[in-house]
Amino acid sequence: MTSSETEPTDDQTAPTPGTDGLADTADSGGETTFDRTLLEARDLSVYYGEERALADVDIEIPEKQVTAVIGPSGCGKSTFLRCINRMNDLVDSARVEGELCFDGKNVYDDDVDPVALRRKIGMVFQSPNPFPKSIRDNVAYGLKVQGKQENVDEKVHTALERAALLDEVEDQLDSSGLDLSGGQQQRLCIARAIAPDPDVILMDEPASALDPVATSKIEDLIEDLAEEYTVVIVTHNMQQAARISDKTAVFLTGGELVEFDDTDKIFENPEHDRVEDYITGKFG
Amino acid sequence: MTSSETEPTDDQTAPTPGTDGLADTADSGGETTFDRTLLEARDLSVYYGEERALADVDIEIPEKQVTAVIGPSGCGKSTFLRCINRMNDLVDSARVEGELCFDGKNVYDDDVDPVALRRKIGMVFQSPNPFPKSIRDNVAYGLKVQGKQENVDEKVHTALERAALLDEVEDQLDSSGLDLSGGQQQRLCIARAIAPDPDVILMDEPASALDPVATSKIEDLIEDLAEEYTVVIVTHNMQQAARISDKTAVFLTGGELVEFDDTDKIFENPEHDRVEDYITGKFG
Amino acid sequence: TGLFAAEGNNVNIAGSSTVFPVTEAIASSFSEANPTINLSLSKTGTGGGFGNFFCAGRTDINNASRAIADAEIEQCGNNDVTPVEFQVATDALTVVANPNADWVDCLTVEQLREIWRADGATHWSDINEEWPDEPFELYGAATTSGTFDYFNEAIIGEEANHRSDYHATERDRTIVQGVQGSEYAMGYFGFSYYSENPDSIKAISVDDGDGCVEPSIETAMNGEYTPLSRPLFIYVAKESLEKAAVRNFVRFYMKRAATDLVSEVGYVPLAEDKRDENLETLETTIEEVTA
Amino acid sequence: MAADTGETPADGFGRVSRTKDVVFRLLALAATLIGIVSLAALLLNVAVDAVGWLDWQFLTNPPHPNPYEAGFLPALVGSIAIMLMIALVTFPLGVGAAVYLEEYANDGYLTRFIQLNIANLAGVPSVVYGLLGLGLFVGLFNIGYGNVLAAAFTIALLILPIVIISAQEAIRAVPDSQRQASYGMGATKWQTIRNVVLPRAMPGIMTGTILALGRAIGETAPLIMIAAPTTVFGLPNSFFSKVSAMPLQIYNWASYPQTEFQYGVVAAGVVTLLVVLLTINSIAIVIRNRYQQRT
Amino acid sequence: MSQPDFSHDGIRTARGTAFRYLFMLCALLSILTTVAIILTLLVDAVDFFAQVSLVDFLTGTRWSPTNEPIAFGVLPLISGTLVITIGSAMVALPIGLLTAIYLSEYASDRRRAYLKPALEVLAGVPTVVYGYFALVYVTPAIDAILPVDLSTFNALSASIMVGIMIIPMVSSISEDAMSAVPDSLRQASYGLGATKFTVSTSVVVPAALSGIFSSFILALSRAIGETMIVAIAAGQTPRMIDLTDPAGMFLDSIQPMTSAMVQIGTGDIVGQGPAYKSLFAVGLTLFVITFVMNLISELVASRYREVYR
Ligand SMILES: Nc1ncnc2c1ncn2[C@@H]1O[C@H](COP(=O)(O)OP(=O)(O)OP(=O)(O)O)[C@@H](O)[C@H]1O
Ligand SMILES: Nc1ncnc2c1ncn2[C@@H]1O[C@H](COP(=O)(O)OP(=O)(O)OP(=O)(O)O)[C@@H](O)[C@H]1O
Ligand SMILES: [Mg+2]
Ligand SMILES: [Mg+2]
Ligand SMILES: O=P([O-])([O-])[O-]
């Protein structure tokens, strides 16, 4: 909330995460650098039946950067993520208020077809969920449902390459996606998500089911992806958020977005005591 | 392990838990006070299939005191408890090595009938599990299965009274045990466990499903019970262990009993760094 | 008598499906007067009833649309069952066709033989060139039934075999429905099945050399309807007459066999002298076993 | 489809055609309803046809070749007698087998073999059970053909697998914490089963058994195979009385020459059979609902 | 220190053992049943095959147990069974599968709550009632509606009725398999911009395929063993089917194995000759076919249950 009013600047360089970023952000105070905003929530609230899971969230997510969403369990991180591609439509009890704009267009407008919307947004889930099909069919699935039938093989290869999986599976494209290891499965899911070439990739705790080695591969991959895609990632692991993201949004209990800023700023010098408490582990 | 060599002393007064105990135990160093040992494990190991859940445990549990068993999740607390009344017999894959003596008799000897053993040992479980019968029949259940058919009504009353439940249910003894609140149900289960007048009461996280008010009633009750019974209680709540127990056994991952001593000693000045780390929340 | 009283109150009957309706009608009115007697009645065909039930000592009474055969008497004898014959009605075995088959109303015995024998005619036009050039669709009694035996003997005779490529069934209802369903169908069965369905099927008159005779109760009773009218029987095991229930039922049966009850189900009732003769036989036999 | 998607989000995101979706949904709904609706239509037909035929005299008379005098009583009583007998046989055997499989048997080869065998038996055609009854009860044990005992034993074997499977489900649904509580009190296995497991599983077991009896009451082919008589006039007065049953009587009537049987008497019989069946099933549902709240 | 007494109580132990074996006996009864089925069928079938060669039985194309010339070729009966199976499969498999998809993917919980029991009523209606429906209502209705020459006894209405009867077997087992497909797969598909139709047909159905397959086999096995519907409505004409003439296959009377068994069982067949014993030979054939199918279905089903524990 503190930072959502700031205007995007021309500065295209994302602040590099790590300790060297500390001085910059500490100096700039409330002032933060912004790219072009791709996603923007205004007064976004979500209710499950009577219960409010997201409370008046305002946020501007920049294009082609990694934005991390962190917060204690049940604070509404997943709910927020699923607002972006309207996956909450699938939950009967869910009700959304406010606006969420994708490139200026409110995705909750009546004329928006959520199916069409989702074709612009890839999604990767907490635990790897490949289809019980061949690796090739898994990656080609999105192309198939979206009717993008040309050059399928080429696109499958490219997607697997971008997902840093190609080398490992190149000669077993016809074996089942379920036969891969957990980390490979998750990269397969990433390949599946990027194959139809979406604009945004949403990831909901994509590494929580993985071992440290697999996790670090996925983290490397996410940083690469940000060169071409806008990545929004939910994580419960603060170190992970600090390592890979450019921006960090901190939700706290009650579905409130307490602070949104450059990642370095959040981790080194947050505005709010509650955020500091949460980050240092005193709460949550 | 540190203290298991020390001989029981004549000192019948259990050290009172709380801060005043601190000075005593801190002063006495490795020296601890013991009552008569009722339960004694020697080199006790338990395997589930190939996996070892309890590793060479040696412990002497004194009579008519509260012994708390704490440790991180999966460390083998429940497994240990269920060794005492041979409930592990019901798990096909479980295999026990070493000895566990009840009043000097190894309960794993061939001539021991686990059914007879369990009649000397009451057990209370994590979440209240009353039978879908009347309150009276619930409490009388042990008497019935054990063939103790005289003065059933009187014994039911006494048990309910000791379990601090009589006042609340006196005029609805014939209504179902399921109609009680969670805390009442758990006290009903305690009444059920003590009605046949066992020697030992085992409790496996008896308050973990309860709200704070119900929990504190149960805690009071446990302290009272120790006047007549030997109580062994598993808890994941260190504050609870500190509040109610005389002795504390700390298991750490791998089913290892790392430290067993007077509760005050454990909480104020543990021998092992790992125990200290665990108790202060740095680990587990 | 409670719900589970003695075996002695049971009367078990099996046998001919042709005689079945007669026995059913009589058993029904008998059991209304005697509710404690458990009468059971099975449609097994005459031969099946003799072979599997009656002569095996499993039933007290067998319905029969033909007289008992020597082999069957022998089988009964081996099991100490003594069959006592009572004629209970007369039947006019009826050949039927579809009402729309307007070209045929009467057939000679030779024509019938040609239609029903093995390697005989296959098309209507084989019998008469003016008739349609369509294959027969034939429905008849199952081979072991009394009806089959009787038809086989009266029409086909010794020299030829009854054909086997026809719809053979124990269930006469099937024949009615089959013939009703196809213009080129033909079938035969007991008269009662025709008399119940005179609108949906048409009876064929039979010419035994003396001109066409329509099957009816009258023509059967006065002996004009040849060669297809036949006597119907029940056979009672002499040994079963020791049971009071069986005695009472057979007495009741004999009296009723001469009444309209029989014509109501489509058969010719017994003449009164024949009935008296039956009753006499019955009482004599009863005396023999109860003595 | 991709071509439908507009390039500039400001104009919305385009629309993806839902024609297939809608058509498929309607198709699936139609498929779901087709069986139910056609059954309802047939039931309606038979109910209409039964009007005027299903009356007191029909329910209290013995059968008769004259459709206006025909009655259903012996078949009705026969069905009920057979069913009671079946309940007496299958309930203890079914519960016993289920208790063994759920509470005693360990997960060895024998158990899995028994389990597979039970699943298979549940799928053996009823006419084959008829032959079993014919060979075993009528032939080998010489109980007699077509009587109450032979009929009940034969159909009991037929529904036993169904009873066992549903009893197993009911027993499996008893929470393990209940057994633990009982063993913890020093109860023996049998005490635990009798005092804790069975009382708790009983509504489920009863429901399953009663539903299986509903299946039993409609069985015809096994009765035919054990040579149950075509028509019975009196009420069964011993275990060895020849017995008919409602479906068998219906099957017989369906072969009678008169159309009054086809469109009247048989319809009345069908309606009676369905009413009895429905009553049985509603008893099961009442039991299930009555006890379901308590869990 | 006097040791506590935890010794075994003889009576208690004996009672426990007695109950154990009593219950075990009940469970073993099911195996006895199977053995008894096989033995009763085999004993008489062996008698039969002593008089009729097994080869003639299995390859003969004429079934005429009582009519001269006598022939015991089972193929016409298997043909009849095949016709009914094919016919009922054409009704039940698509309808049952669509029903399962509707229930699992489209119907709201409330709607499912009354549709499922309503469907189960279909399976609970006695088969003799279905047979009666087929003969008395369905055949005349088809005859009136379709411009075909339908025999009174025909495979068509019998197949339709058998098909309707087995719909619930297909739908409920398939639905179980579809419900077992983890939601995460559906989410993945929706997340890629799939419509409900695509999710159902390209993710849920393929993932539930083994369960669906198992439901198909089980339902067909049930159709093969169905007796009363065919005995009442399909006729008694054992004939070889001509697969090139589908109309003739369905419009005329046929005789499946079960119906032949009923005919022999009620027929006017005397004594212990091959005509009577053929009942058991056909019964054995039927048992073997359905047993193998049930076994396959059970094995396939247990595999799908493992996939998503
Ligand atoms: N389908 C649902 N129906 C009802 N309530 C829901 C549903 N999904 C989530 N909630 C509730 O909404 C709140 C936010 O849930 P959400 O899943 O967004 O949290 P989260 O931050 O992702 O938590 P976690 O870290 O545990 O995944 C929680 O209180 C949760 O119980
Ligand atoms: N029935 C069982 N079969 C196989 N392994 C088991 C079984 N019960 C427990 N274990 C394993 O044994 C180990 C110890 O389990 P135990 O239940 O004793 O832990 P615990 O300390 O009580 O944990 P918690 O605090 O979570 O209850 C764990 O690794 C557990 O996975
Ligand atoms: Mg979440
Ligand atoms: Mg535990
Ligand atoms: O049943 P039948 O009268 O033809 O033997």
Image (spheres, coloured by chain):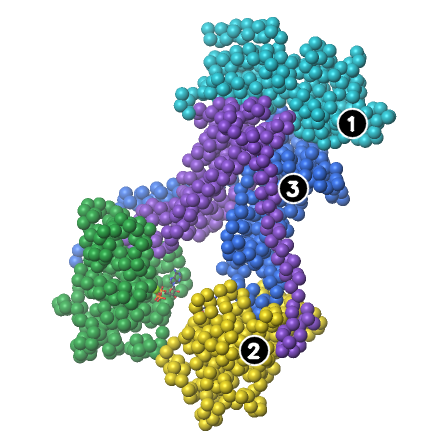
Chain colours: A yellow, B green, C cyan, D purple, E blue
Q: Is residue E296 above or below residue C4?
A: below
Element type at mark 2: strand
| Ligand 2 rendered quadrant | bottom left
Residue, disc 3? E159
Q: Is residue D216 visible?
A: no
Residue C121: give x, y in percent of width and height.
81, 26
Q: Residue at x 76, y 44 (%)?
A: E244
Q: Quadrant of residue B261?
A: bottom left
Residue C101 is marked as: 1
Q: Nearer the viewer, residue A249 or B77?
A: A249
Mark 1 C-beta to ligand 5 under 8 Å: no
Gap in angstroms between the C-alphas marked 2 and 1: 81 Å
Q: Quadrant of residue A199?
A: bottom right
Gap in angstroms between the C-alphas marked 1 and 3: 31 Å
Residue, disc 2? A101
Badge 1 and badge 3 both on one subunit: no
Q: Residue at x 46, y 85 (%)?
A: A2
Mark 3 is surrounded, within 10 Å at the Cα level, by few (under 14), some (14 to 19) or many (20 or more) other residues, namely: many
The three-letter amino acid code for the residue at tag 1 is Ala
Q: Residue at x 57, y 36 (%)?
A: D47
Mark 2 is surrounded, within 10 Å at the Cα level, by few (under 14), some (14 to 19) or many (20 or more) other residues, namely: many
Q: Is residue E142 above or below residue E296?
A: above
Which image quarter holds the N terminus of chain E? bottom left
